[in-house]
Image (cartoon, grey):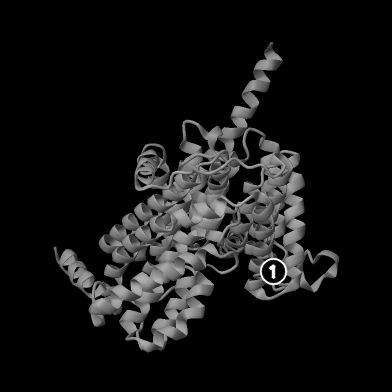
Amino acid sequence: MEILSLLGDGMLVAIQPLNLLLILVGVTVGLFIGAMPGLGSVNGVAILLPVTFLVPPGSAIIFLAAIYYGAMYGGAISSITLGIPGASTAVATTFDGRPLALMGKARLALVAAAIGSFVGGTVSNILFTAFAPILAAVALSFGPPEIFALMLLAFATFVGLGGDDIAKTVFSICFGLVLATVGFDQISGAPRLLLFDLTGFLGGISFLVLAIGVYGIGEMLWTIESTRGEISKTDADISVKGVIEDMGETVRKGWKGTAIGSFLGFFVGVLPAAGATPASLMSYAVTKMVSKRPDEFGKGHVGGVTAPEAGNNSASTGSMLPMLTLGIPGSPTTAILLGGMVIWGLTPGPRLFVDQPDFVWGLIGSFYVSNFFALLVNLSFIPLFIWMLRMPFTVLAPVIFVLSVVGGYAAMQDMFDIWLILVFGFGAFFLRKFDYPLAPAVLAIVLGPIAEPTLRQSLLMSSGDPSIFFTRPISMPIMVVAIILILLPALKYLRPRRSSVAE
């Protein structure tokens, strides 16, 4: 009851006129920041951080948190309407969101993304409120072996993302892992795989650059090739009745993905150094794995939209937990929020809940209000997003190209990234023509920089003994489940071969 009383006090703080106005402005600005390729929540919060010095510290962090929420919602917009992920957190949304738009169901995809985001945010807010101290302690018990085991489990779940061709899926994963090792070694500092001795590779391959190239340029080329510019018209009906009907269909077909993304995303978000991008990708992979119709994923399944959107929104709240309770940022965006709190004279950590209860519970209360406002704003702008899709593809294709180039350049202001975007775009187009799955490679590039250093750190801890993964109480069950999931597709692959040999 004490928690409910504190939450009630926090809600009263959040709905004060100034804070309410900042929440509305924050989620609206964040929505369009998230939809712009190359920006995302990190850049949006960093750019608008100086503005917050005009308001009290409590209102400032509420405003930045609202931008974070809005950006999580907004990333799905360009993923669905243009096939370009607004941020790395929305890459998985393109897998089924873009096919739905090409089928003339963009409104359904946008509604599903909004509902999945709202439910994921609500579930994570409840978990945050109820279990903050306990989950913070659990997160602290995750060392390199546990994090590597979790990454291996993620790899095991998306073995099935490439369809029935296991060989091509494994090749795609290995190719992505190779790309993830380009640049300086995180442990030794030695340069690796500097192709043609180009200095642009010293910093590694940016995941945002790869995502824009594969799902921006590559998708544009594939659409031109497969449809010759003739894309099916999207929903003409943008009435309230149509949106309500899509809400019903989202609940019927996407409830499983929403539930998985909400809980899994929060847990992954709580872990330091994980964040919303792995959470959304893992949520998509697990949802497809447990689905009765996994072959429909990648072709326009509603669950393929709700799962990653629920996952990244849930993880965004989860990443706040270690920042507030331990002073450890759970994502790049929360690292900026942490810096802002220090500037405002607030010290994150266990004492924050005792010394600054009004600030903490006001912020937690703003999570609920921001999540509700973000849903309303997102649904209100659906007619605008639908209008974008009504443009002829002869107009839309140049827009996609320009946004891809501008978004790729905006991140680091480096022309080398533009050339990489074009290379990845043409490469993705030809790989797709030869039926090589792209999703496993993209996922491997996300998780590779986390999996490799934790593997090496674990082996350093055990003097090279791999049994460390099976002797620790948390990593052992995760490793066992991961190995089982890896072997299951292989058994399914070998069973038909055995039967054919017997015949």
Toward the viewer: 28 or 308? 28
Helix, strand, or loop for circle 1? loop
Q: Which residue is mark 1?
A: 185
User: Dot 1, how many residues are within 10 Å of its Cα: few (below 14), some (14-19), or many (20+)?
Assistant: some
Q: Is residue 33 left or right of residue 220?
A: left
- Residue 191 vertical placement versus 384 (above, below): below
Q: Farthest top residue?
A: 503
Name the side, left or right, on which 495 lies relative to 1: right
Q: Looking at the picture, which amino acid does disc 1 mark?
A: Asp
Q: Give coordinates of residue 41: x percent, y percent.
A: 49, 69
Relative to the observer, which residue lies in front, 335 or 460?
Answer: 335
Q: Is residue 175 left or right of residue 293?
A: right
The residue lying toward the viewer, choosing from 213 and 153, is 213
- Locate residue 205, reporting x and y percent: 69, 65
Count the labels in the image: 1
Residue 355: image location, x then y, percent: 25, 82
The correct choice, above or below, for 298 with respect to 445 in the image is above
User: Can residue 442 be seen by looking at this rendering?
Assistant: yes
Q: Is residue 477 visible?
A: no
In which quadrant of the rendered image does the N terminus lie? Answer: bottom left
Q: Quadrant of residue 14?
A: bottom left
Above or below for 411 versus 432: below
Residue 225 percent across, percent down from the top left? 74, 43
| Residue at point 19%, 65% (across, down) | 3
Q: Which quadrant of the rendered structure holds the C terminus?
A: top right
